[in-house]
Image: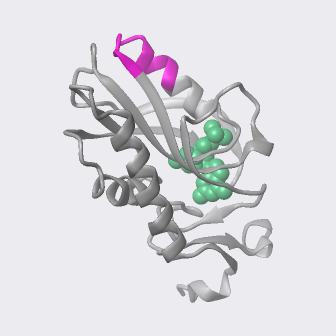
């Protein structure tokens, strides 16, 4: 049986209104930063970044292409494996283009570092990173977002694109999962 989501969420960490306000603010930084540039390719990492990309892109005023990549780093569950495999590549050439990687969360940083290195080999003009959430305590490699939405403590979060075993991505807020859910 599918359980009621309220029963598996410990607490709401970031509510819908705070997310929307912050994302509008982030969009204003992006607009300002790229206002004199000719290109901007926003690259969201599937599936976790879909909601963030959709919400952010609504407020982007500069001409942009929305692109998607799928990489795998997490198996199912909550442990990071540190390995990145490209499951779906870009549909477009990024040579001499400005690329903005749109991430849901930076945890250990392994995924993003490998992805960034991969994209760098394609000779883009520039690569920047925006992440909705940052868990700086968990970082294992040197990588920092150029913009972030919220720094969060070391807790497993779900919602607004983020999943637990492919579930809960549709929640309109960021919530903390009850420990008993993933420890059982
Ligand atoms: P790394 O460790 O490589 O991992 O920075 C980044 C990816 O791991 C996933 N991730 C999470 N997913 N709740 C989730 O639903 C979390 O608290 C969490 N922490 C890391 C996520 O897919 C991210 O892109
Ligand atoms: Mg992800």
What residue is drawn where x is 53% and y is 68%?
A: 159
Above or below 79: residue 83: above
Q: Position of residue 147 (x, y in %)?
A: 53, 41
Instruction: Decide which of 158, 37 is in the foreground and name it.
Output: 37
Place residue 10 in its image quadrant.
bottom right
Hey, which quadrant is residue 73 in on the image? top right
Q: How many marks?
A: 0
**Is residue 165 on the magenta stretch?**
no
- In the picture, the quarter occupied by the C terminus is bottom right
94, above or below 162, in the image? above
125 is within the stretch colored magenta: yes
Residue 46 seen in this snapshot? no
Q: Position of residue 33 (x, y in %)?
A: 39, 34
Vertical side of 127 occupied by 121: above or below: above
Q: Position of residue 43 (x, y in %)?
A: 35, 37
Residue at the image position 69 percent from the left and 71 percent from the top: 177
Pick whichever, 133 or 35, lies toward us. 35
- Quadrant in the picture for the N terminus: bottom right
Which range is magenta? Answer: 116-126
Name the foreground residue: 27 vs 83. 27
Q: In the image, is residue 141 above or below residue 152?
A: above
Q: How is the image coloured?
A: one colour
Inspect this view and state whether residue 80 appears: yes
Residue that appears at 49% across and 30% down: 85
């Amino acid at each position: 049986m599918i359980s009621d989501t309220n029963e598996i969420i410990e607490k709401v960490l970031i509510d819908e209104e705070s997310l929307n306000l912050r994302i509008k603010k982030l969009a204003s930084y992006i607009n300002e930063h790229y206002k004199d540039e000719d290109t901007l390719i926003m690259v969201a990492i599937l599936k976790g970044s879909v909601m963030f990309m959709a919400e952010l892109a609504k407020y982007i005023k500069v001409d942009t292409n929305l692109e998607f990549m799928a990489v795998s780093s997490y198996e199912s569950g909550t442990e990071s494996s540190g390995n990145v495999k490209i499951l779906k590549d870009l549909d477009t050439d990024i040579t001499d283009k400005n690329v903005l990687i749109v991430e849901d969360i930076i945890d250990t940083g392994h995924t993003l570092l490998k992805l960034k290195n991969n994209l760098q080999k394609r000779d883009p003009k520039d690569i920047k990173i925006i992440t909705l959430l940052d868990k700086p305590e968990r970082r294992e490699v040197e990588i920092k977002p150029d913009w972030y939405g919220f720094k969060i403590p070391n807790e497993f979060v779900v919602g607004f694109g983020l999943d637990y075993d492919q579930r809960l991505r549709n929640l309109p807020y960021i919530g903390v999962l009850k420990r008993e859910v993933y420890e059982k």
